[in-house]
């Protein structure tokens, strides 16, 4: 579908969107600039679909809305105009884009083979004048004709303007009225033109030969819908549609006096019969171009100002001192972790650079090789060139939801390690927390973040908190770390005591910065715009995205839906339902799209991550899932089964589930490939990226005991490094 949309845009030289819908035929809406393709029971070939697209783009280029209005008011036979206009626009389109002739040729050939025009076992000579025109300009085929008919057929090729088409349509209708008595039923020949089968075949070949040049220009004409445009006036639209399906023009004339295209009727019936009535309709939604990230994202400076005013200034002095001490403790405990990450990163980066090194000759002689000039032709010195290392970058997304309250402290420690690592290796970074508490969900909130555009996704109750960035000073970074850590004590993580032993109450957190829902999917949707800006500003070549969360995203299904009643506004809270429609999400800026086939947050997350990878194919997407609960941080069974896509009630999965549980108990981490993520790290609550170094040698311990303790430590050290090694390998 993306390919077809791109082709349509290029051919029409405008922003045409190609969609599949439960429609009776292909059509082009001249108002919305939407090209509609039906959903068929059996998939048609690409040739047919490309022909559909080319035909409808031809209408977009050459059929004005005023033409439809003109034939309606003049009461000209719509069906006749349709056939002639199709021939005109296809000829003009093929002349503009000669490469499209093959698509028309192959597409109509397939439709003829499938009997879309009702020509099976039919003598072309028995067709009326408009049917002969229809088939000839689509396929080049023609039966026996009179000189007068042949002249009319050739006049179609001379139509240059819509006015020419309307004039010829009126002429054909008059011709039909004058000669309808000469036209016999199917299977019979005209009395004054009766010929033997051999003579008919000879004449047909002659006609085809004479019109071969004309056929090349007017190759195959797609008869789907003759671009019936959308009209503001619903009453007029109904009248137009009636005209399109009626036997003739308005005015109360007898049906037998009206010129009617039986091949056109057969085509319409074949299209209708081929439509998949059981198929779900499709809803096409867009990631808004107008998304105002400056309104969605709160800068770290703004956050510091608001927190300082409503949170920090209200700290009890003893509480503030205790949090600072706790922050210093965390920093010192994790120095070795960061040091190890830095060392591994530099080693892997250097190894990668060496692999890409190239050796080339210089223009200088290698004096050490001159003695071998008789048998060695390579006497020039060589130089090894190591390409400049890739500019890395990292954007981390933090889950700011209520379920994180018990896990937030441990998650922040993981996050701080990553920040310190980035600072040490001078990698540009950004930390964004996703929240739905800062805004409400009013119409004004939506309008502040994006323009009102039909079928655009909406983001009314969603914000990103820029907690950290490489642009911050070290003092600003440590201040923000301390304040976020201070918040964890308000969420009931643990009690905090001052030096004299009395309990210190934490400061109340402003509601707009408190924990709320889990808009992970909204965060992923907006990642493209954030990423493009970040990579441009920091000249980043290789970007790593890290999502830290403890649960699934809540569902995101809101979009700018049509007006209700007499409302002057679109509705920002329309909600789609995948049970009734297939929902396609497209990024207009890149043309990339994804299908949403479920309402659960995890299903949507997978779809949005796939869309993100299409938009930015060179990024690395990593997920940290802090999944455990309770004293030992045990990972629930349902989390394991969802991550590994296993049915916990299926006996065949019992062994694999037990193996994963054992791994989590032993290694304190499980690494899997959740759809959409390059790697997904499942961590029990409280598991840290740590590097142990202390041996537990007891007094009077014998040599054998010391050896066992050393081996035990070495094993633990290896296990603790597993997560670090895998993580560094991905980002380096």
Image: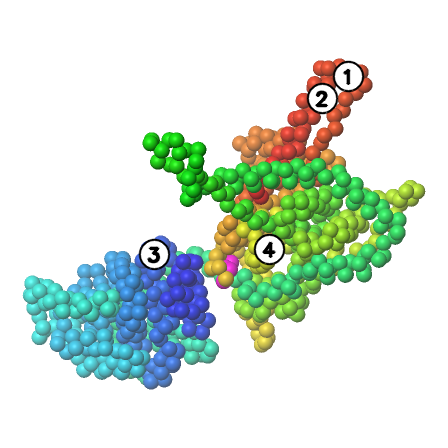
Name the image quarter holding residue 333: top right
In the picture, the quarter occupied by the C terminus is top right
Q: Main secondary structure of the magenta part?
A: strand
| Front: mark 1 or 3 | 1
Look at the picture and state if 424 lies above or below 20. above
Q: Residue 709: give its label.
A: 2
Q: Secondary structure at mark 4?
A: helix
Does residue 339 show up?
A: yes
Q: Of circles 4 and 2, which is in front?
A: 4
Inspect the magenta stretch and tell me whether residue 668 lies in it: no
Tell me the element at label 2: helix
Quadrant housing residue 119: bottom left
Q: CA distance from mark 1 to mark 4?
A: 55 Å
Q: In the rendered view, does 629 fall on the left or right side of 581?
A: right
Rate crowding at label 1 as few (under 14), some (14 to 19) or many (20 or more) other CA atoms within 10 Å: few
For discs 3 and 2, the disc positioned in front in the rendered view: 2
Does the residue at mark 3 contact the one at mark 2 (Cβ under 8 Å)? no
Q: Which residue is mark 4?
A: 538
* Earlier-in-chain disc, 4 versus 2: 4
Q: Element type at marker 1? A: loop
The one nearer the camera, 496 or 119, is 496
């Amino acid at each position: 579908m993306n390919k077809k949309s791109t082709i349509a845009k290029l051919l029409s030289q405008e922003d045409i969107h190609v969609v599949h819908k439960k429609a009776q035929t292909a059509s082009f809406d001249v108002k919305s600039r939407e090209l509609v393709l039906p959903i068929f029971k059996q998939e048609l070939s690409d040739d047919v679909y490309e022909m559909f697209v080319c035909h409808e783009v031809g209408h977009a280029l050459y059929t004005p809305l005023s033409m439809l209005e003109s034939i309606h008011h003049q009461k000209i036979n719509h069906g006749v105009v349709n056939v002639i206009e199709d021939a005109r626009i296809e000829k003009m389109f093929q002349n503009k884009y000669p490469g499209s002739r093959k698509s028309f040729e192959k597409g109509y050939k397939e439709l003829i083979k499938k009997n879309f025009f009702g020509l099976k076992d039919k003598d072309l000579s028995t067709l009326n004048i408009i049917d002969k025109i229809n088939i000839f300009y689509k396929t080049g085929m023609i039966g026996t004709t009179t000189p007068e008919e042949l002249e009319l057929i050739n006049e179609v090729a001379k139509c240059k303007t819509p006015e020419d088409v309307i004039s010829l349509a009126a002429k054909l209708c008059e011709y039909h009225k004058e000669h309808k008595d000469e036209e016999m039923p199917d299977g019979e020949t005209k009395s004054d033109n009766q010929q033997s089968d051999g003579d008919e075949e000879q004449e047909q070949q002659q006609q085809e030969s004479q019109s071969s040049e004309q056929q090349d220009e007017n190759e195959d004409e797609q008869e789907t819908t003759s671009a019936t445009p959308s009209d503001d006036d619903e009453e007029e639209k109904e009248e137009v549609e009636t005209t399109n399906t009626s036997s003739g023009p308005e005015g109360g004339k007898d049906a037998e006096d009206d010129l009617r295209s039986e091949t056109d009727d057969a085509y319409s019936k074949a299209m209708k019969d081929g439509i998949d009535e059981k198929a779900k309709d499709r809803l096409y939604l867009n990631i808004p171009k107008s998304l105002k990230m400056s309104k969605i994202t709160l800068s770290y400076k703004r956050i510091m100002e608001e927190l300082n005013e409503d949170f920090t200034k209200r700290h009890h002095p003893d509480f503030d001192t205790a949090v600072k001490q706790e922050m210093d403790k965390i920093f010192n405990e994790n120095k070795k972790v960061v040091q190890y990450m830095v060392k591994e990163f530099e080693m892997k980066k250097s190894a990668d650079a060496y692999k890409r090194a190239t050796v080339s000759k210089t223009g200088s002689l290698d004096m050490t090789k001159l003695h071998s000039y008789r048998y060695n032709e390579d006497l020039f010195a060589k130089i090894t060139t190591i390409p400049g290392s890739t500019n890395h970058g990292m954007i981390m997304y933090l889950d700011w939801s209520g379920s994180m309250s018990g896990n937030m402290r441990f998650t922040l420690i993981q996050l701080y390690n990553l920040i310190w690592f980035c600072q040490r290796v001078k990698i540009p970074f950004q930390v964004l927390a996703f929240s739905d508490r800062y805004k409400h969900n009013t119409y004004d909130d939506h309008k502040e973040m994006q323009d009102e555009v039909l079928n655009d996704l909406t983001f009314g109750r969603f914000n990103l908190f820029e907690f950290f960035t490489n642009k911050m000073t070290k003092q600003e970074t440590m201040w923000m770390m301390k304040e976020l850590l201070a918040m964890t004590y308000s969420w009931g993580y643990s009690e905090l005591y001052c030096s004299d032993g009395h309990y210190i109450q934490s400061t109340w957190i402003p509601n707009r910065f408190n924990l709320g829902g889990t808009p992970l999917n909204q965060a992923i949707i907006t990642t493209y715009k954030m990423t493009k800006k970040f990579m441009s500003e920091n000249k980043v070549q290789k970007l790593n995205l890290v999502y830290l969360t403890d649960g699934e995203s809540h569902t995101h299904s809101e979009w700018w839906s049509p007006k209700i009643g007499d409302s002057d506004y679109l509705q920002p809270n329309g909600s789609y339902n995948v049970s009734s429609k297939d929902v396609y999400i497209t990024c207009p800026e890149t043309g990339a799209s994804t299908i949403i086939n479920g309402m659960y947050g995890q299903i949507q997350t997978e779809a949005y991550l796939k869309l993100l990878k299409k938009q930015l194919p060179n990024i690395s997407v990593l997920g940290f899932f802090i999944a455990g609960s309770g004293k030992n941080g045990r990972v629930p069974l349902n989390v394991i089964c969802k991550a590994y896509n296993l049915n916990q009630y299926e006996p065949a999965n019992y062994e694999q589930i037990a193996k994963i549980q054992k791994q989590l108990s032993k290694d304190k981490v499980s690494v899997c490939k959740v759809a959409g993520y390059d790697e997904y790290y499942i961590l029990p609550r409280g598991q840290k990226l740590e590097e142990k170094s202390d041996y537990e040698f007891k007094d009077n311990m014998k040599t054998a005991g010391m050896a066992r303790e050393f081996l035990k430590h070495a094993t633990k050290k290896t296990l603790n490094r597993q997560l670090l090694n895998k993580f560094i390998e991905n980002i380096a």
